[in-house]
Image: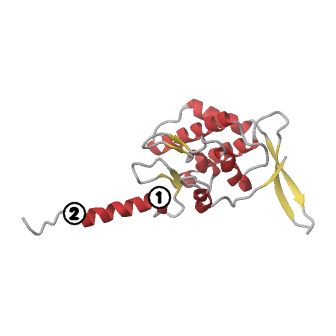
């Protein structure tokens, strides 16, 4: 199985049109963890019938070909990635089981890089995912994204949780002024709250 690296993924608008709260982050790993809403109550965005297939289809351009992963394996990797990222943001040590789960997913499908010459005489790099011994290449690719992120201090410094205390979404603040998971979700809520405070503040000009 061969895979030419593609960085273009779904946009936030693509994800929201498909019924997901947010998405379109530069890493599939972040889009995956954001399918689980932690507050105000746990809600799995992949749980409804057909939702998982839709989500994987939206991410297909930046993942290797192959079958949709087993739901239990997807959720196990999602939980491990979320745990590692949360603990980093909170300054807590990682749980060894989460590290092991990410490493297991990444190592289940070995890969190698091949040089390919196209019809125009141009070279391209392709990744071959060796699925002969099992594993799922999509989960392996997401696990490797997580490993690369956690081992890159400069990029990891951009990891944020939404500034809305009632939101659990994570993102990479490539624009350092970014505070919200999405401007049309928590950004709008913050603007509405500020407007309400201004327009309903007590008039202190009179006793």
Q: Give percent across and percent down for residue 172.
A: 54, 56
What color scheme is it?
A: secondary structure
Q: Residues within 10 Å of mark 2 (few under 14, many from 20)?
A: few
Mark 1 lies on a secondary structure that is: helix
For the C terminus, which image quadrant? Answer: bottom left
Residue 138 figure quarter: top right
Residue at the image point whose x is 69% and y is 46% from the top: 53
Q: Are marks 1 and 2 in contact (CB under 8 Å)?
A: no
Residue 34 badge:
none
Residue at the image point whose x is 64% and y is 42% from the top: 49
50 or 180, which is in the foreground? 50
Q: Which residue is mark 2?
A: 201
Residue at the image point whose x is 80% and y is 44% from the top: 111
Horizontal side, residue 59 vs residue 195: left or right: right
Q: Give percent across and percent down for residue 35.
A: 57, 46
155 or 5, which is in the foreground? 5
The outermost residue toward the top is: 97
Alpha carbons under labels 1 and 2: distance apart: 24 Å
Q: Give percent across and percent down for residue 130.
A: 83, 41
Mark 2 lies on a secondary structure that is: loop
Q: How many marks?
A: 2
Is the residue 38 above or below the residue 118 in the image? above
Q: Is residue 25 visible?
A: no
Q: Earlier in the sequence, mark 1 or mark 2?
A: 1
182 or 26, which is in the foreground? 182
Q: Give percent across and percent down for residue 74.
A: 65, 38
The outermost residue toward the front is: 49
Residue 185 badge:
1
Residue 191 figure quarter: bottom left
């Amino acid at each position: 199985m061969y895979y030419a690296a593609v960085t273009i993924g779904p946009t936030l608008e693509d994800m929201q049109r498909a019924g997901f709260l947010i998405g379109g982050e530069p890493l599939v790993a972040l889009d995956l963890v954001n399918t689980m809403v932690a507050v105000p109550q746990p809600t799995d965005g992949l749980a409804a019938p057909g939702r998982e297939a839709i989500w994987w289809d939206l991410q297909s351009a930046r993942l290797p070909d192959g079958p949709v992963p087993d739901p239990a394996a997807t959720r196990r990797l999602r939980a491990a990635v979320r745990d590692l990222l949360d603990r980093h943001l909170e300054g807590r040590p990682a749980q060894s089981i989460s590290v092991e789960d990410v490493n297991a997913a990444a190592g289940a499908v070995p890969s190698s890089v091949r040089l390919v010459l196209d019809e125009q005489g141009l070279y391209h790099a392709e990744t071959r995912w060796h699925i002969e011994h099992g594993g799922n290449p999509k989960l392996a690719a997401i696990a490797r994204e997580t490993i690369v992120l956690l081992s890159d201090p400069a990029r990891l410094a951009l990891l944020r949780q939404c500034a809305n205390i009632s939101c659990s979404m994570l993102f990479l603040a490539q624009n350092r002024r970014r505070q919200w998971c999405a401007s049309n979700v928590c950004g709008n809520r913050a603007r509405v709250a500020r407007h309400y405070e201004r327009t309903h503040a007590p008039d202190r000009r009179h006793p």
